[in-house]
Amino acid sequence: MTEQTVAAENAWLVATIARYVLVNARDEAEASRLGRPALYEIYADMRERLGREHPILVHTVRPATPEEVEQWNWHYEMVAKENARH
């Protein structure tokens, strides 16, 4: 799963209408290629609930803002700390 921090200088946001991931990539094409499998992983709950595949339509691929990178990294650092406690 995409439970990792990203480096601000090459972070890209890849998003559907409802969910997004940040990936490290050299350009938009690489970000799209890396983002699709990561989005597929986070849509597992939809596939389980529906009992079938759920289409993943990427609507946005763009460089991530510094604020998005900061929030993304903070989230995964907190998840890692919580997991270490258990």
Image (cartoon, rainbow, N blue to C red):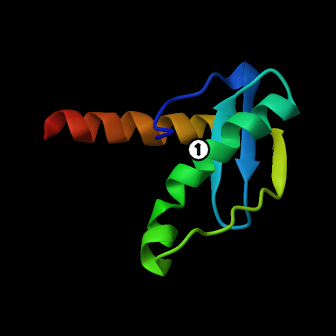
Task: Judge the density around disc 1: few (<14), some (14-19), many (≥20) Cα neighbours within 10 Å.
Answer: some
Q: Position of residue 25 (x, y in %)?
A: 74, 25
Residue 64 in sight here: no
Disc count in the image?
1
Between residues 8 and 16, which one lies in front from this camera angle? 16
Q: Give above or below for 7 relative to 86.
A: above
| Residue at the outermost front position | 52
Q: In the image, what residue type sits under mark 1?
A: Ala
Between residues 73 and 58, which one lies in front from this camera angle? 58
Residue 55 in sight here: yes
Determine the image quadrant of residue 61.
top right
Where's the C terminus, which quadrant? top left
| Residue at the outermost bottom position | 50
Residue in view at x 63 percent, y 22 percent: 7
| Label 1 element class | helix
Q: Give above or below for 30 relative to 53.
A: above
Between residues 2 and 73, which one lies in front from this camera angle? 2
> Circle 1 sits on which residue?
38
Residue in view at x 65 percent, y 53 percent: 20
Residue in view at x 52 percent, y 55 percent: 42
Q: Position of residue 22 (x, y in %)?
A: 65, 39
Q: Give above or below for 44 relative to 28.
A: below
Q: Position of residue 67 (x, y in %)?
A: 67, 40
Residue in view at x 48 percent, y 31 percent: 4
Q: Position of residue 38 (x, y in %)?
A: 59, 44
Between residues 84 and 30, which one lies in front from this camera angle? 30
